[in-house]
């Protein structure tokens, strides 16, 4: 009671999965609320009016842009019905994901795992292809360096075009987090029926491409989607322009000539020059790996 409260987004005034945030603030006796940006969601509108009517002082930030960046997933979901898509890649200096095709390899080691866990924790859902489930049998959970699982886990999504994941995959059987199979209309109904008793099945149109898959996830309220991509999925993401951001974790070694390539598509080139589609937004070092964030639009370091 009597406290100041700082929030990035205007408190809601509607009943969704939880009661209105504005009502909770009024009941707690908050004195002042400082808000980063207004919520463009018309369904949730009216929170500020409620607060002011209850005698609470409300102020907005002079510049809403940094808060729009924080809430980018929510804003994109409202505007387009699709989540904001971040693609994480872990590779060697010669851009190799593993030493041999179809095999698991710890190319970026514990430091890369720490980065991955942080990205998963910031996401509503984490997605891999059925091919990755076959090759790596990942758990896709948020864990600390000691292997302890976080209390809050993202939704685990297996992207299926036609190839099915194995029925005994950990992501389907361990019960450590909710799991969803995102299957195209090319996938066998009979094969999917065998999974329907243990996980939710959501369908998408193969003709509509990955944007159709992402809209299907958007209907489930996924605003921030992390995709941990192998070469085929990465190529599809790049060629269909179905990602908003790439996070590249690089380890200081070489995978070698026998290692599969990271990207399987055509070069972005104009004559003898590269035609960049993404620009570096942020870069840093985590122990023995580097991390570079690439966005479709350049932003200043301060942002």
Image (cartoon, helix red, strand yellow):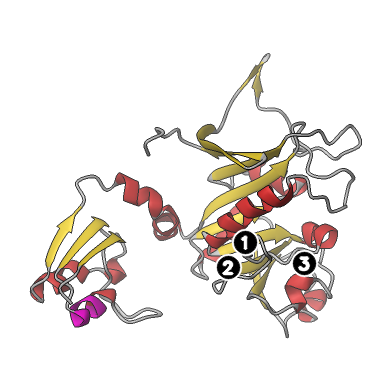
The mark closer to the camera, 2 or 3, is 2
Direction top: furthest residue? 272
Q: Earlier in the sequence, mark 1 or mark 3?
A: 1
Question: Based on the displayed image, in which of its 4 quarters is residue 157 positioned?
Answer: bottom right
Magenta region: 23-28
- In this view of the protein, can residue 37 be seen by the observer? no
- In this view of the protein, can residue 185 be seen by the observer? yes
Q: How many numbered marks, from 0 up?
A: 3
**Image coordinates for residue 78, horizontal then vertical, percent:** 40, 60
Label 3 Cα neighbours within 10 Å, binned few <14 / some 14-19 / many ≥20: some
Tell me if residue 3 is in the magenta stretch: no
In the rendered structure, are the residues bearing label 1 and label 2 in contact, judged by CB atoms less than 8 Å apart? yes
Residue at (66, 22) in percent of width and height: 269
- Comparing 79 with 49, the one in front is 49
Which labelled disc corresponds to residue 126?
A: 1
Tell me: residue 131, above or below residue 256.
below
CA distance separating discs 1 and 3: 21 Å
Which labelled disc corresponds to residue 294?
A: none
Reading the image, the residue beneath label 2 is: 154
Tell me if residue 27 is in the magenta stretch: yes
Which labelled disc corresponds to residue 187?
A: 3
- Comparing 240 with 256, the one in front is 256
The mark closer to the camera, 1 or 3, is 1
Tell me: residue 154, above or below residue 102.
below
**Image coordinates for residue 123, horizontal then vertical, percent:** 53, 60
Determine whether, in the image, residue 136 is placed left or right of residue 219.
right
Residue at (49, 68) in percent of width and height: 221
CA distance separating discs 1 and 2: 6 Å
Question: Based on the displayed image, in which of its 4 quarters is residue 128 positioned?
Answer: bottom right
**Image coordinates for residue 50, horizontal then vertical, percent:** 15, 74
Q: Earlier in the sequence, mark 1 or mark 2?
A: 1
């Amino acid at each position: 009671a009597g406290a100041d409260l700082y929030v990035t987004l205007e408190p809601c005034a509607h009943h969704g999965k939880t009661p209105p945030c504005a009502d909770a603030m009024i009941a707690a006796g908050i004195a002042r609320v400082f808000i980063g940006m207004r919520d463009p969601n018309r369904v949730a509108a009216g929170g500020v009016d409620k607060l002011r009517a209850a005698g609470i002082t409300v102020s907005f930030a002079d510049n809403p842009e940094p808060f729009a960046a924080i809430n980018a997933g929510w804003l994109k979901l409202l505007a387009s019905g699709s989540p904001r898509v971040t693609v994480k890649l872990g590779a060697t200096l010669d851009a190799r994901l593993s030493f041999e095709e179809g095999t698991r390899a710890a190319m970026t080691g514990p430091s890369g795992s720490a980065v991955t866990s942080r990205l998963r924790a910031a996401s509503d859902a984490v997605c891999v292809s059925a091919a990755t489930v076959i090759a790596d049998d990942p758990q896709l959970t948020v864990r600390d360096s000691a292997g302890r699982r976080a209390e809050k886990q993202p939704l685990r999504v297996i992207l299926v075009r036609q190839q099915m994941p194995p029925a005994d995959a950990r992501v389907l059987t361990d019960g450590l987090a909710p799991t969803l199979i995102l299957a195209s209309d090319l996938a066998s109904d009979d094969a999917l029926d065998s999974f329907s008793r243990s996980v939710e099945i959501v369908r998408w149109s193969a003709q509509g491409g990955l944007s159709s898959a992402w809209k299907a996830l958007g209907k489930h309220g996924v605003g921030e989607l992390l995709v941990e991509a192998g070469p085929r999925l990465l190529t599809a993401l790049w060629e269909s322009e179905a990602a908003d951001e790439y996070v590249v974790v690089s380890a200081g070694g070489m995978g070698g000539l026998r290692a599969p390539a990271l990207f399987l598509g055509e070069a972005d080139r104009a004559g003898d020059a590269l035609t960049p589609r993404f620009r570096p937004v942020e870069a840093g070092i985590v122990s023995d790996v580097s991390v570079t964030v690439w966005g479709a639009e350049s932003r200043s370091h301060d942002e």
